[in-house]
Image: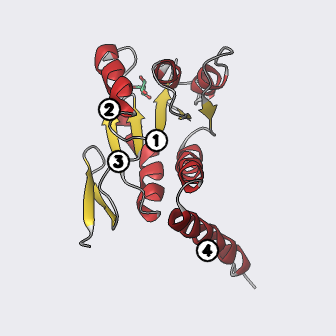
Amino acid sequence: MSAASLFCPSAGFRIMNPMSDQPLVGVVMGSKSDYEVLSAAIEILRALEIPCEARVLSAHRTPDQLFEYVASARGRGLRVLIAGAGGAAHLAGVMAAKTLLPVLAVPIAATPLNGLDSLLSMVQMPKGIPVATLAIGKPGAANAALFAAEILALNDAALYERLAAWRAARAQEVLDAKLPE
Ligand code: RP5
């Protein structure tokens, strides 16, 4: 079987996946300015060979296009959505309102409140429409990708092995750490 490749349009690089070019994770950001943070998620998805797609869609600036994207996500094969936004960050909540796919939220420090505004906007979803909120910024973006991988690995033994190897490598980095004499 020839290796298929997937181009992440907004990310600008290719993810290789030997089995499929069907995006499983949709990474949505409220603005192009959020890309620097969300790239941490895309890098992890790439490392784990999880096909993804990236989009810039805003809950307040392009609500119709966002609705259309989320409403069609499951039917197009997406299984997890990652939403990154700053300020009054309603992106993840609006997305969760339109789908039963898991939505993982990444608060972004885009205002003088340094991400606390978006963290509270995302984590304080009213009962009934869940959003799983990660940490502010790049650590949260990376963890969103790992969380997405854990969800997908429930039904993908090969991905489970890649994820286990990735975590073992991080542990080895700690054990190999050298301090100044
Ligand atoms: C939010 O406003 C975006 O998610 C971004 O974090 C923030 C600033 O957006 P820009 O003014 O940089 O487009 O909607």
Rendered view: 24 above or below 15: above
Give the mark nearer the N terminus: 4 vs 2.
2
Give the mark nearer the N terminus: 3 vs 4.
3
Q: Secondary structure at mark 3?
A: loop
In which of the image's four quarters is ligand 1 placed?
Answer: top left
Judging by the rendered image, the residue that carries numbered circle 2 is 56
Judging by the rendered image, the residue that carries numbered circle 1 is 79
Residue 112 or 164: which is nearer the viewer?
164
Q: Secondary structure at mark 1?
A: loop
Q: Give the position of the C terminus as an image quadrant.
A: bottom right
Which residue corresponds to the image point at 32% horizontal and 50% vertical from the top-left? 22
Q: Position of residue 67 (x, y in %)?
A: 36, 19
Rendered view: 41 above or below 60: below
Could you tell me the amino acid type at mark 1?
A: Arg
Label 3 Cα crowd, 10 Å radius (few <14 / some 14-19 / many 20+): many
Q: Quick one: which residue is furthest to the bottom in this view?
A: 181
Could you tell me the amino acid type at mark 2?
A: Val
In this rendering, position of residue 120 left or right of residue 95: right
Could you tell me the amino acid type at mark 4?
A: Ala
Q: How far is the residue under mark 1 from the one under mark 4?
A: 26 Å
Which residue corresponds to the image point at 54% horizontal and 51% vertical from the top-left? 142
Q: How far is the residue under mark 2 from the one under mark 3?
A: 16 Å
In this rendering, position of residue 60 left or right of residue 100: left
Judging by the rendered image, the residue that carries numbered circle 4 is 169
Q: Position of residue 59 (x, y in %)?
A: 40, 18
Q: How far is the residue under mark 1 from the one under mark 2?
A: 18 Å
Which residue corresponds to the image point at 34% horizontal and 22% vertical from the top-left? 66
Give the mark nearer the N terminus: 2 vs 3.
3
Q: Is mark 2 within 8 Å of ligand 1?
A: no
